[in-house]
Amino acid sequence: MAAITPSEPVSTSTQEIHTKKMWKTLVGHVPISSPFYQFHPVTRLYLFVFLGVVPLFIFVPEINFLLVLVSMALMLWGRADLRGLRIYAPMVVTVAIFMFTVVILAPGKDPTYTPLHMSLITIYYQPVFFTFAAYWRLMAMLSGTILYFSTNRERDMLVALRAVRLPFVASYVIGLSIRAAGMFMEDFRTIREAEQARGLDTKAMRISDQVKLYVMYLVPLFSIALRRAEEISNALFARGYTVTGRVKGGGQRRDYIRSLYAIRTRDVIAIVILISLFVGAGISNLFFNVFVITDSPLNIYLRGVLNIP
Amino acid sequence: MSTDATTMTAEGVWAVEEGEIRSPGIIHVVMLALFTGIGIVVGTFGSLAIPIGFVSAFWPGQAVQSIGSIWFGWWGGIAAGLFPLISNSLSGSAPLPVSIAYLPANILQGMIAGYAFRRLKAHPALVHGRDWSIWILWGALVPNAIGAAWGSTMLVAFGLVTQAAQLITFLGWFVGNSIPTIILGSIILKFVSPLVMRSNAFVKKWWA
């Protein structure tokens, strides 16, 4: 499918088609008319780095909660298919269960901790609130990551990495590995369907046999990967590709895929804003002790209610 | 006539024959990418299968890490470091900064097995009892102990778990990685190694 560049003129009838067509992103689908695609892939990569890393400088759960909302709002704005996010639901719940169970069972032995006697157990305020703040920090970082993978394709990632001048071999390996993950899943489906066509009924199998069967799927999959490696490397060799990306006889190979995308004024403005916010948050936290857990309004309120100094 | 890989001696597997020229090439780069792709799928499904917080109760990705370095030397080691960056992001089990902090341990989790198999001359197809013991000790238990120690320390450093919770996190991580590594890794090595050893992508030294 041809790339739709931001500068490409779009007629009304083409617009109608675009609203129905979807890009397959790394973990979902997004309409090709999504406003995200009005920005260069490198701008989206900066957004990913910002949302994925800036919570490290913020230990105020309210702000991290807002960052989660920002990521969700961006997903809605970008018209991402939110049904794909269901796969993360068990993770979101079990992470909370794990973190709070661990901190209740192993709160530590600091004498300054304030015990709170519940009906059956005693919990300690400081480690529990620390865990609460850590949970929202984690959720903020994860939502930024999920946003990126929900709204970008392997191709967007490749263009973004090349735009930041990552060496050819590194960007090629990352791009091919993500594509290979998709091919690997396709092969997996083919093998399963071939077995089912021969009458294999996995529902009638014991769980131990199902696990054994699952493991045995890997044998043909690795065989296919080996054969594919030979084919791809022969194809690359035939087209004159080298590990360095240089053309024999000197010079660099023209980067066709990157030439399809142009960085525009809106990209520059967005990148400057993201970098400024990122640096601002980092300096505020590291040098001026801002965005720390004691700044949390909820923490201040609870300490007041519980008479904790 | 080609020799059956399983009938080769362990020393013979790693020995470079007289006149045999081995140099890294495009096939190794492609294999690195494809192996990383396999790792992404196995790692993502492992993280989503039985998640218990930042660790999974079943993470077969470590098997792929150890196997990769046994078969492909440093190319497998690079894949071992690279694929968790992507699979952790796709599965939502760890954000990117934390995954980057895991990087040294992930490379070690892969390379320890590769180093041990080359240094101790173990057969990748696990032909003898000695090969099995080297695999279980240096391919599963030691790498996972190091990985779990480093990973749980990073979680404390990032303020995601308290110091007091580190031991529980370590144990969950170690068990959750070791059991699938031993089960899955053993089967893959036993059945797929003979195929890999016959391919051009197999690495006898470190890079070729």
Image (cartoon, rainbow, N blue to C red):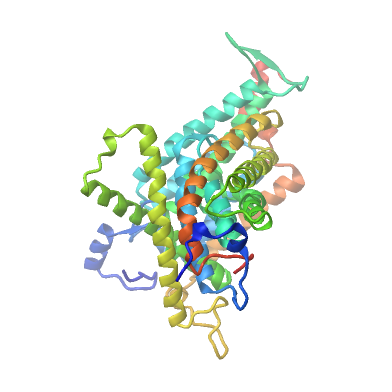
Looking at the image, residue A272 sits to the left or right of residue A3; the answer is right
Picture quadrant where residue A250 is located: bottom right
In the rendered image, residue A255, in percent from the top left (x then y), is placed at: 48, 78
In the rendered image, residue A290, in percent from the top left (x then y), is placed at: 70, 42
Residue shown at 21% from the left, 49% from the top? A197
Residue shown at 41% from the left, 53% from the top? A219
A78 versus A137 height, above or below? below
In the rendered image, residue A287, in percent from the top left (x then y), is placed at: 76, 48
Looking at this view, is B79 or A303 the one in front? B79
Residue shown at 26% from the left, 70% from the top? A11
Residue A92 visible somewhere in the drawing: yes
Total marks shown come to 0
* Quarter in which the C terminus of chain A is drawn: top right
List the single residue furthest toward the bottom: A249
Looking at the image, residue A160 sits to the left or right of residue A288; the answer is left
B40 versus A265 height, above or below? above
In the rendered image, residue B44, in percent from the top left (x then y), is placed at: 47, 47
Residue shown at 48% from the left, 68% from the top? A159
Looking at this view, is B2 or B162 the one in front? B2
Looking at this view, is A282 or B159 the one in front? B159
A152 versus A213 height, above or below? below
Residue A42 visible somewhere in the drawing: no
Looking at the image, residue B186 sits to the left or right of residue B116; the answer is left
